[in-house]
Image: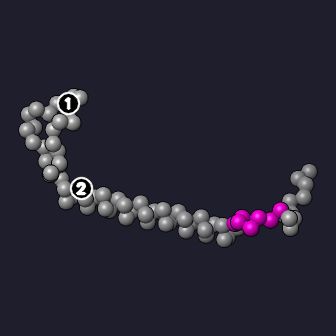
Amino acid sequence: MAGNTQMREEERGVFSFHGAIGGLLFVAILLSILVFLEIWALEVQQNSANKPYEIKNIQNVQAISDDNYKYDISNN
């Protein structure tokens, strides 16, 4: 037998969200995370477009090398 599924008064939590309110809150949180990530992605893309890599002396760069950190690829 499934037992009693009714919630008693002392079992109710103040911060528990069930049903439509919980679903709407969940969707609102997901949408706010989505908006944050979209704005962050746009900022990263704009920064990458405004400051492209500049490789100096391309002949010395090897595909796999521990010395690649020595080559300046920034605009500084």
- Please report the residue visible at 55 percent of the width from the left and 65 percent of the height from the top: 29
Q: Which residue is mark 2?
A: 48
Q: Which one is in front in this view, the residue at disc 2 or the one at disc 1?
A: 1
Displayed quadrant of residue 45: bottom left
- Figure check: 3 above or below 65: below
> What kind of element bears circle 2?
helix
Q: Amino acid at mark 2?
A: Ser
Secondary structure, magenta segment, majority class: loop
Rendering coords of residue 13 (x, y %): 76, 64
* Label 1: which secondary element: helix
Q: Which residue is painted at 83% across and 62% down in the image?
A: 11
In the depicted view, which residue is nearer to us: 18 or 43?
43
Asked if residue 2 is positioned above or below residue 19 in the image, the reply reads above
- State which region is magenta: 11-17
Mark 2 or 1 closer to N-term? 2
Q: Mark 1 — residue?
A: 67
